[in-house]
Amino acid sequence: MRYSILTTPIGPLLLAASSAGLAQVRLPTRGTPAPPEPGWRQDPMALAEPERQLRAWFAGERRSFELPLDPRGTPFQRAVWDLLAEIPWGQTTTYGDLARQLGKPGSARAVGAANGANPLPIVLPCHRVIGRDGSLTGFGGGLDAKRWLLTHEGHRFPQQAALFEG
């Protein structure tokens, strides 16, 4: 696996690619980049296109990604991740809605677990999945990062709307 570190507004992201495509985007912990696995080789040139597209996304110049991807997971996880890829920029959905789309309406918690195991956050936009009541729910990079990502996409939170109402 080859990797690079990309500086972003939510902190340094570790990007990792296999020969088949982008395999991981690891979110930082308290501003510190995730460490690479033993045996991984730093190779920014191999990650030049994912870096370019992510920079454009963070700059608001891109709303989706066109990259070969290589996320590794169970068939159920991959089905959830495929649905994540379909959530448009600036929109949100819930775990229950994703479970219904899968034809498994009682599996919202399993969908949440698959969402949490997403190896490609931002690219497969798990930050766009929120609680049934509209609340922010867990996110590997922390709720502040999730709030930043959603705000970047134009999402207004009820407390933000109250600030602008007379």
Image (cartoon, rainbow, N blue to C red):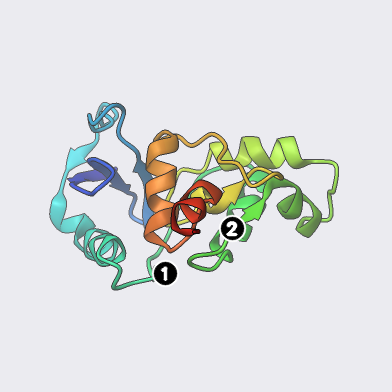
Q: Residue at x 56, y 64 (%)?
A: 91
> Which amino acid lies under the numbered mark 2 shown in the image of this protein?
Thr
Q: Please tell me the numbered disc located at residue 123.
A: none
For the residues labelled 2 and 1, the Cα–Cα distance comes to 15 Å
Q: Is residue 17 left or right of residue 122?
A: left
Name the spot of residue 144 as percent of width and height, x first.
39, 38
Amino acid type for the residue under numbered disc 1: Ser
Q: Are marks 2 and 1 in contact (CB under 8 Å)?
A: no
Residue at x 28%, y 60% (from the top left corner): 58
Residue 44 location (% of width, % of height): 15, 52
Q: Is residue 16 above or below residue 49?
A: above
Q: Is residue 20 visible?
A: no
Task: Residue 66 in the image: state x and y as whole percent.
Answer: 39, 71
Instruction: Determine which residue is flagged by label 1.
Output: 64
Residue that carries the numbered disc 2 in the rendered image: 92
Q: Quadrant of the N terminus?
A: top left
- Front residue of 147/157: it is 157
